[in-house]
Image: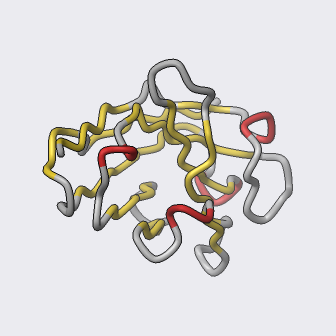
Amino acid sequence: QVQLVESGGGLVQTGGSLRLSCAASGRTFTSYAMGWFRQAPGKEREFVAAINWSGRNTDYADSMKGRFTISRDNAENTVALQMNSLEPQDTAVYYCAASASGVSTPNKSWQYHYWGQGTQVTVSS
């Protein structure tokens, strides 16, 4: 079992930045690829970014490339999402997730086994 707790959400203006963090506890952190997803009101949950167990490989949704950066610290059991140049359409609840699927950087929600409770990000225009 893995417990995930996100933090760092909040209200920011268009063009601003936020850094989300996810703290993991439980089984060996390096057993898991980690990912971030988001869900806006009335929309399906969508993939944001993923990182493999070592941190060497990353993947991003097209609309996040160049603006978001995912990273992990295996010594601290944390994964972070640095979000720059935020836009109103980035407003959503952001979820951290852990995958034991064996896929390096999974980008499907069904590939993830553990989820955090989510943190709200609101970008004002």
Q: Residue 16: x and y, percent? A: 18, 61
Q: Residue 45: x and y, percent? A: 60, 32
- Which color scheme does this rendered protein use? secondary structure
> Residue 58's quadrant in the figure?
bottom right
The quarter of the image holding the N terminus is top right
In the image, 60 versus 123, the foreground residue is 123
Residue 89 to residue 106: above or below: above
> Residue 104's quadrant in the figure?
bottom right
The quarter of the image holding the C terminus is top left
Left or right: residue 42 compared with residue 109: left
Residue 43 to residue 34: above or below: above
Left or right: residue 83 compared with residue 63: left
Residue at 19 percent across and 55 percent down: it is 14
Left or right: residue 78 compared with residue 57: left
Q: Residue 35: x and y, percent? A: 59, 51
Residue 29 to residue 82: above or below: above
Residue at 76 percent across and 54 percent down: it is 106
Q: Residue furthest right?
A: 102
Q: Residue 69: x and y, percent? A: 44, 70
Residue at 59 percent across and 34 percent down: it is 2
Residue at 72 percent across and 37 percent down: it is 109
